Amino acid sequence: MNNNITIGGVVLKKTAALAPMAGVADRSYRLMCRKYGAAYTVSEMVSAKGICYSDKKTAELCTVTEGERPMGVQLFGSEPDFMAEAVKIVLDYDPDIIDINMGCPVPKVVNTGAGSSLMRDVPLAAEITEAAVKAAGNVPVTVKIRSGWTADSVNAVEMARALESSGAAAVVVHGRTRDQFYSGSADLGVIRAVKNAVNIPVIGNGDVTDSESCLKMYRETGCDLVMVGRGSYGNPFIFEEIEAALAGREYTPPSVEERMRVMLEHIRMMTDSSAKPEELAIHEARKHAAWYMNGYYGSAKFRGRCYQLSSYSEAEELAEEFIELQNSRMHKKIGETS
């Protein structure tokens, strides 16, 4: 397996990338995942029309810091002219890649004709892509799609071919239809079919939760890169795990102490980088704190308490309690078996 892939002139390690996730993968999240080996990160979705109308959030969402590179800025929209104008504005933020979202299933995006709604209009999707490519100049444009709109209209291959013809430098395929949202299983066969149909790099996305599922994605689809979304919730370590597996190295999962240390570091990054008061920043950090505790003994009760956090010091206290619970549980089990 080649250790790198190239999208336009951008070289990425062939390990795993972090998927763009609105309301989740903010700068702190991206930096944490890069720290643990994410090969590539993408911004949260940014409205092309919003950028053109000088949306106040634009600078915050589009800014690319050195620690996040290589990084793409993701746009969504349904009008070629607005997309082209938005791309020109985004170029001022010096992204490595511009990505167009044609896969988001949420109604507020789909109802504007953007996101996965474009799976129903391949000519328009191609027109939007062509406009973005012309505006982007030397910056590569990629497109994220789904397998189709419904199970009866799986058209990812047709879509990918049209996007390639329009100048897309790569395509990301989430192996679910729009009406599946995030239920059921991702169809690896669709990703494989796209890979066999186009000459540009294909990035596979869906249901990668550990190194085993990542290796399966590579093996069964032949994709050029794997993208991890929900599998990274409270688990930036997944990128380290995947990198080790691909290199044939043994991987040691983090201890509960290490998990809680990283959780607190993540929360501190969120509070330090936010212009909001600590209490509001902590409110946004609550779900992340809860995710770091998933899968442990007694975690349901602690996750509930995470959603009541109002300060960083409370998070520190909760982390200490959580560690004590896990250690006492482990000592009890050792006592029962000795």
Image: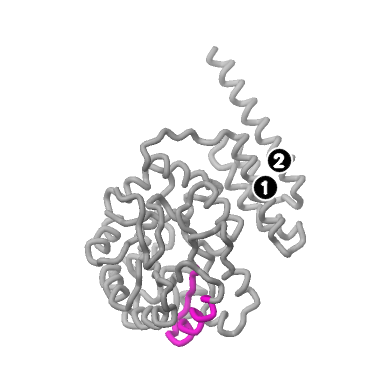
Question: Of 127 and 36, which appears nearest the observer?
Answer: 36
State yes or no: residue 241 in magenta: no
Instruction: Report the number of numbered marks.
Output: 2
Q: Tell me which residue sits at (45%, 35%) in the image.
A: 251
Label 1's element? Answer: helix
Disc 2 or 1, which lies upstream in sequence? 1
Residue at 43% x, 63% y: name it.
181
21 relative position to 290: left or right:
left
- Residue at 66 percent across and 36 percent down: it is 322
Main SS of residues in magenta: helix
Residue 178 place in picture, x, y as percent: 39, 67
Front-most of residues 182 and 135:
135
Q: Is residue 52 left or right of residue 163?
A: right
Three-letter amino acid code of the residue under disc 2: Leu
- Quadrant in which the C terminus is drawn: top right
Q: What amino acid is at disc 1?
A: Cys
- Residue 2 visible: yes
Disc 2 target residue: 318
Residue 306: assigned label: 1
Q: Most extreme residue toward the bottom, as rendered?
A: 81
| Magenta part of the chain | 73-91
Query: Residue 52 appears at what percent x and percent y?
Result: 56, 84
Quick one: which residue is furthest to the top in this view?
338
Residue 249 in which image quadrant: top left
Question: Is the C-beta separation of discs 2 and 1 under 8 Å?
Answer: yes
